[in-house]
Image (cartoon, rainbow, N blue to C red):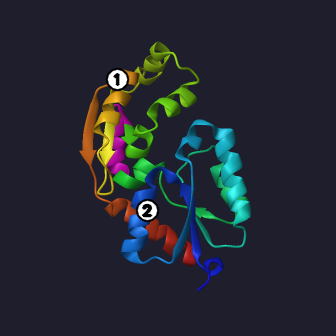
Amino acid sequence: MTSGDRMLLLGCGVLRREIDFLIEKNAWPLDTFFLDSALHCELDKLSASLTAALEEYRGREIVVFYGCCHPLMEQMLAQAGAIRTEGQNCVDMLLGHERFSEELERGAFFLLEEWARRWRSIVTKSCGTTNVDIIREIFQVDRRYLLCVRTPCSRDFTAEAETAGALVGLPIRWTDTTLDNLEAVLHEAIIRRAG
């Protein structure tokens, strides 16, 4: 089977290690192409990067690993003939919708390792400022804590999480999760694409 015959998983790199682990574990015949997770902070760049990647791989069977991360996501995918994984965002797909929704209602802002390691850059891009007082005001309007999510593929990012919490003025909490829900979401999308 050549790479042109294999399905392509194209998507956000925030859970790259977890996805690569699941592909190897299940021996899924998938190629991958990951985009920078910080593109979420700049919707024009996300749209341009995703559209360019979809065009580059036109003709391949493509599963897109994104949630509702751009207001035109469904239109971009429809134009490319691609499908996406089911879920509001990557944390929803990782934790499962019920657990994700419960934490969101409690005031969580979810922090994965990949973003924790690049937090200052990502926050200043998304908030449009380096002013700490403004950043804290933005985060504290409706968020009560940073929920740091560890997976079996995570390395220790305690120091980075503490720095992130200090920057936005929110306490940090920790939760561990398996990859079971993410595996189910990916498997369902692969089956749907192959069907």
Residue found at the far bottom of this picture? 1
Asked if residue 108 is among those painted magenta in the image, a careful observer would answer yes
Magenta residues (range): 96-109
Q: Say which residue label 2 marks.
A: 19
Residue type at the position of mark 2: Ile
The reply to whether residue 106 is visible in this rendering is: no
In the image, what residue occupies the spot 42% across and 78% down?
A: 27
Percent x, y of residue 184:
39, 66
Asked if residue 62 is among those painted magenta in the image, a careful observer would answer no
Dominant secondary structure (helix, strand or loop) of the stretch shown in magenta: helix
| Quadrant that contains the C terminus | bottom right
Pick the front one: 86 or 20: 20
In the image, what residue occupies the spot 67% across and 73% down?
A: 60
The reply to whether callout 1 and callout 2 are in contact (CB within 8 Å) is no
Percent x, y of residue 20:
44, 65
In the image, what residue occupies the spot 28% across and 38% down?
A: 158
Q: Say which residue label 1 marks.
A: 166
Around disc 1, counting alpha carbons within 10 Å, would you say few (fewer than 14), some (14 to 19), or many (20 or more)? some
